[in-house]
């Protein structure tokens, strides 16, 4: 019999604004919902530099990872969505700093639009230790 799915919902990340979960644990893995730079305290989109917005996204993801008992060193795959690939270098600097020496697999794609008018969205897949 398979293990039931476990929903992750933490106050340190924005509440889901639709019929989805912040994260789901399945088969020893955490799958996060894509996170945009929403401030979990206000529910408002952070408007700043791409670096500031990327850091907010990583703060949200860090809270979800912690809620599942893992952290950035446990991340196996990251998917980054940008509305402008011209922002790649600025995002990549924050990405490298947040992951340190760890290098997960990553895809980065340019998209037409993101929720709430965001410029960046990131989703992760992590191994539960």
Image (spheres, rainbow, N blue to C red):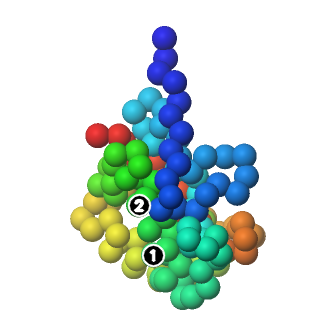
Q: Residues within 10 Å of mark 2 (few under 14, many from 20)?
A: some
The residue depicted at 65 percent of the width and 75 percent of the height is 44
Considering the numbered disc 1 on the image, is that residue within a helix, a strand or a loop? helix
Which residue sits at x=33%, y=48%? 70
User: Up-down: is 46 above or below 107?
Assistant: below
Please state if 89 lies on the left or on the right of 117 as rendered.
left
On the image, the x and y values in percent for residue 97 come to 32, 74
Q: CA distance from mark 2 to mark 1?
A: 10 Å
Q: Nearer the viewer, residue 102 or 19?
A: 19
Does any portion of residue 78 appear in the rendered image? no
**Residue at x-position 73% and y-position 71%:** 116
Report the label total: 2
Residue 68, given in percent of the width and then of the height, sits at 40, 45
Badge 2 or badge 1: first in the primary sequence: 1
Furthest toward the top, the residue is: 1
In the image, residue 6 lies at what x, y percent? 50, 34
Instruction: Give the residue displayed 58% in from the left and 62% down from the top.
Output: 14
Numbered mark located on residue 84 in the image? none
Q: Nearer the viewer, residue 112 or 97?
A: 97
Relative to residue 12, is residue 3 depicted above or below?
A: above
| Mark 1 closeness class: few <14, some 14–19, many ≥20 residues within 10 Å | some
Would residue 103 be found to the left or right of residue 26 on screen? left
Q: Quadrant of the C terminus?
A: top left
- Locate residue 108 relative to residue 114 in the image: left or right: left
The quarter holding residue 59 reads bottom left
Provide the residue designation for mark 1: 55
Q: x, y percentage for residue 47?
A: 61, 85
Residue assigned mark 2: 62
Q: Check if mark 2's residue and mark 1's residue have beta carbons within 8 Å.
A: no
* Whether residue 49 can be seen here: yes
Q: Considering the numbered disc 2 on the image, is that residue within a helix, a strand or a loop?
A: helix
Judged from this view, the residue extending furthest toward the left is 101
């Amino acid at each position: 019999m398979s293990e039931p799915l476990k929903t992750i919902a933490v106050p340190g990340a924005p509440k889901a604004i639709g019929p989805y979960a912040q994260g789901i644990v399945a088969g020893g893995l955490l799958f996060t919902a894509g996170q945009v730079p929403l401030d979990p305290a206000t529910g408002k989109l952070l408007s700043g530099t791409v670096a500031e917005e990327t850091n907010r996204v990583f703060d949200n993801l860090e809270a979800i990872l912690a809620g599942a008992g893992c952290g950035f060193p446990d991340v196996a795959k990251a998917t980054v969505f940008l509305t402008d690939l011209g922002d790649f270098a600025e995002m990549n600097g924050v990405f490298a700093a947040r992951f340190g020496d760890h290098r997960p697999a990553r895809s980065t794609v340019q998209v037409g639009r993101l929720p709430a008018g965001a410029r960046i969205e990131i989703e992760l897949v992590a191994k539960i230790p």
